[in-house]
Image: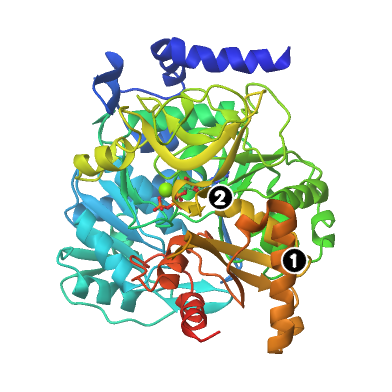
Amino acid sequence: MASIRYADFHRRSLEDRDGFWREQAALIDWHQPFSQVCDYANPPFARWFVGGQTNLCHNAVDRHLADRPDQNALIWVSTEVDKETVYTYRQLHAEVQRMAASLLALGVRKGDRVLVYMPMIPEAAFAMLACARIGAIHSVVFGGFASVSLASRIDDAEPTVVVSADAGSRGGKVVPYKPLLDEAIRLARHKPSNVLMVDRGLSAYDRVEGRDADYAALREQYLDAVVPCTWVDATHPSYTLYTSGTTGKPKGVQRDTGGYAVALAASMKLIYDGRPGETYFSTSDIGWVVGHSYIIYGPLLAGMATIMYEGLPVRPDAGIWWKLVEQYKVTVMFSAPTAVRVLKKQDPAYLSKYDLSSLRALFLAGEPLDEPTAKWIAESLGKPIIDNYWQTETGWPILTICNGVEKAPSKFGSPGKAVYGYDVKLLDEQTGEELKGPNQKGVVAIEGPLPPGCMQTVWRDDKRFVNTYWSSIPSKLVYSTFDWGIRDEDGYFFILGRTDDVINVAGHRLGTREIEESIASHPNVAEVAVVGVADQLKGQVAMAFAVLKDPSKVTTPEATLKLEGEIMKVVDEQLGAVARPARVRFVNLLPKTRSGKLLRRAIQAVCEGRDPGDLTTIEDPSALQTIKELVAAPR
Ligand code: ATP
Ligand code: MG
């Protein structure tokens, strides 16, 4: 019975699309009501809430002043500099106006871009909200990026102003930002007219005369600033943000205002079941889409308090997150499997040390949630663990369990069902035909229009939007996620990996993830990456790179060969000899993006002696270098 309710809810969201979203639109304030819910006259470009005017900052901040002025809004906790600052909605309102006035003073106007290159400090949130307030378009660049990545984003966004800070801090070590920014501006074609500097006093820097402005000084000048919200069309861009760059050059995702506000407000209620007055804790970074949607906008739109955490999950100890849950009575938490895996290596006693009774559920997203990780965290926490599948492009979940509609059970390995508003289909990659039966493997695709909140286009590149996302399935205008999936009898999806992670060995199509899972079942394997490498005889062969739990087992060439043989045998037994990797090499570290995703395409390129391409998002280039050397070395 229960499952019928969600199925009905989902069906209605598609069959009565306009009626459904008109209802959700009532969750936010409109300065001017919209005249049309969805304009899809020019597919694949969807325009939501046409004719309506609103403001994201008004809805996230000002709107709550009437009911909850003295309630916590932004809770900033830094274990890097040992500080905790709590801003009520009234205080947040004042800070955002000070920032908005400063940006206006530097000449920022509606439609201008403001690049935010900041550590996880409150001023970053103020800057984002201040942009939304005055109709400027923010483009947050993850603070961990270095000059070249930053320069390419400056050139793409062409910001009037860059908001930055002297430094961030990681694991107690100061990480200067300003020299990287100066170098990026030097490298970039486009020169921003001003840099607004938040000086944390962590790292001395050179001030560029006439360009750099000091935020503390400007803020002082505008302490009592009153900056009204600029009402913008629902379709006015609120921000641009780059994808993680796991599969290639990052794409500049452009998001609207009205659709995004409605989609997030609805998701807070229907997916996260977060209620006004409660506290939401997302452990992401503002540099990623999860940080945009669920550190800043989503919780604030919902009238919740949001925790912004600067620091590592294991410092001062692995109990820090749970301590915050207890202290601020967090009801909804959001993290990533990669972070959970970090905690899994620590003493599980940290999870039982604190009172976690306020917490209703932990949501995870960003990469496949493997069963051992899911089981470990579910058992240690004793709370529902809910997987979310989505993309920077969509801005909010495509697949999950909609907790606020119906508390349906999760299935291990599955992020759940198609979320309301998303017409998710599995398509045959070759023919484009829809695969309707259970357990058939196809490309996860979304029938247009994409629901509110999803990307409008690629920033200044409509052609790339159409060519990249809407042209990969033969004879169909349909959005491709570039992920493989299957759906079981109950409508639960399983993500099988990315479409470019499939390898073809002598005519057999194999998912790299399948081979990885098989190798990972060997007791000494902690983590593994498998890629397909061109082979004259077989077309492609699988190559594996594994991180060992106990590397002391492979200190001699004989022992290394022996372990390699053992692992190959595991694959032979589980998947068959076709899937057996040509080599299994042992490394200390796998190349990953800064958001913790495996860079398979870079490993593949290096194995094939090609240029690995855009590496602007790589966490530690030495990981790739090691692989390069291994591959180059004679057997
Ligand atoms: P790029 O598009 O630049 O190559 P990216 O795809 O890693 O980078 P994101 O938008 O951060 O950039 O990630 C979205 C992708 O992450 C999805 O397409 C999917 O491959 C993977 N992903 C996200 N959540 C999940 C999940 N819950 N389960 C499995 N895979 C997931
Ligand atoms: Mg992607």
Classify residue 107 as left or right of residue 183: left
The relative height of residue 405 versus residue 464 in the rendered view (above or below) is: above
Q: Which residue is mark 1?
A: 345
Judge whether residue 494 can be spotted in this image: yes
Label 2 to label 1: alpha-carbon separation: 28 Å
What scheme was used to colour the molecule? rainbow
Q: Name the element at disc 2.
A: strand
The amino acid at mark 2 is Gly
The amino acid at mark 1 is Lys
Classify residue 439 as left or right of residue 174: right
Answer with mark 2 or mark 1, whichever residue precedes in sequence.
Answer: 1
Q: Quadrant of residue 544?
A: bottom right
Classify residue 367 as left or right of residue 122: right
Residue farthest to the bottom? 556
Name the spot of residue 497 as percent of width and height, x first. Answer: 54, 47
Indicate which label's residue lies in the foreground, 2 or 1.
Answer: 2
**Quadrant placement of the N terminus:** top right
The relative height of residue 622 versus residue 619 in the rendered view (above or below) is: below
Which of the two residues, 292 or 544, is positioned nearer the viewer here? 544
Q: How many marks?
A: 2
Judge whether residue 599 can be spotted in this image: no
> How crowded is the residue under tag 2: few (<14 C-alpha within 10 Å), some, or many (20+)?
many
Q: Which residue is mark 2?
A: 511
Q: Quadrant of residue 522?
A: bottom right
Name the spot of residue 479 as percent of width and height, x first. Answer: 37, 33
Name the spot of residue 489 as percent of width and height, x first. Answer: 66, 23
Q: Name the element at disc 1.
A: loop
Which of the two residues, 493 or 161, is positioned nearer the viewer here? 493
Which of the two residues, 509 or 256, is positioned nearer the viewer here? 509
Which of the two residues, 120 or 5, is positioned nearer the viewer here? 5
